[in-house]
Amino acid sequence: MKKWIPLGSRILLGLIYFVFGGMGLAMAAGLMSMPETPPMPEAATAFMTGMMATGYFFPLLKFTETAGGFFLLVGRGAPVALVILAPVTLHIFLFHACLTPGAGELILPAAMVCLQVLAMRGYWTLYRPLFGPPRSA
């Protein structure tokens, strides 16, 4: 695989997480108001309400996204950032696949899954031992 594909994927995924995570962090801190969007389905609204009601989870999630996006952009610690962001990417995809109607809602989440896989492919030599037989100590 050409080296620029994982690099480009890492940078694009980093931009997505850094920008949207930063916006969510600004909203959680009260520095920015929630943008006007069409109402979400009832199940999605209930999920988001519960996540916000915890008081800690939404800011923690957005901090993780922002920090992970930053590390992907600068390339320092990118393999670890990709591992930390993998369940977040999966959750974003599943949230939109299960709780929001329409194929249009899946465009960005599906693109994020593809970018995640392509970016991780660039670090496969680091991840390969995780999938092999266990070593004895």
Image: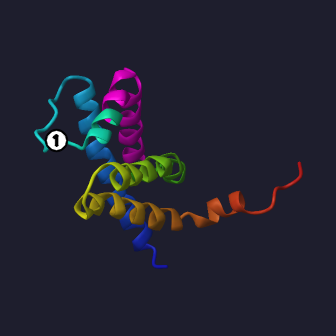
Residue bounds of the magenta highlight: 48-71
Q: Is residue 82 visible?
A: yes
> Along the line of sight, which residue is nearer the eye, 21 or 125?
21
Picture layout, residue 8 above or below residue 66: below
- Per the image, the residue denoted by label 1 is 39
Instruction: Characterize the magenta stretch by its predominant secondary structure.
Output: helix
> For residue 53: magenta?
yes
Residue 59: x %, y % from top left: 36, 28
Q: Residue at x 33, y 52 (%)?
A: 96
Q: Which residue of the protein is positioned furthest toward the left in this rendering?
A: 36
Furthest-right residue in this view: 136
- Is residue 73 visible from the viewing direction of this image? no
Q: Residue at the location (24% across, 44% down)?
A: 41
Q: Is residue 115 above or below residue 74?
A: below
- Where is residue 81 drawn, in percent x and y? 49, 48
Q: Secondary structure at mark 1?
A: loop
Crowdedness of circle 1 by 10 Å Cα count: few (<14), some, many (20+)? few
Question: Does 90 appear above or below 66?
Answer: below
Task: Using the image as rendered, state which of residue 41 and residue 56 is in the foreground.
Answer: 41
Instruction: Give left or right: position of 120 versus 53.
Output: right
User: Which percent across, then down, holds residue 78?
Assistant: 48, 52
Can you give x and y, in whole percent of width and height, for residue 91 in the image? 43, 48
The amino acid on which the numbered mark 1 sits, given as a three-letter code, is Pro
Residue drawn at (89%, 48%) of the image: 137
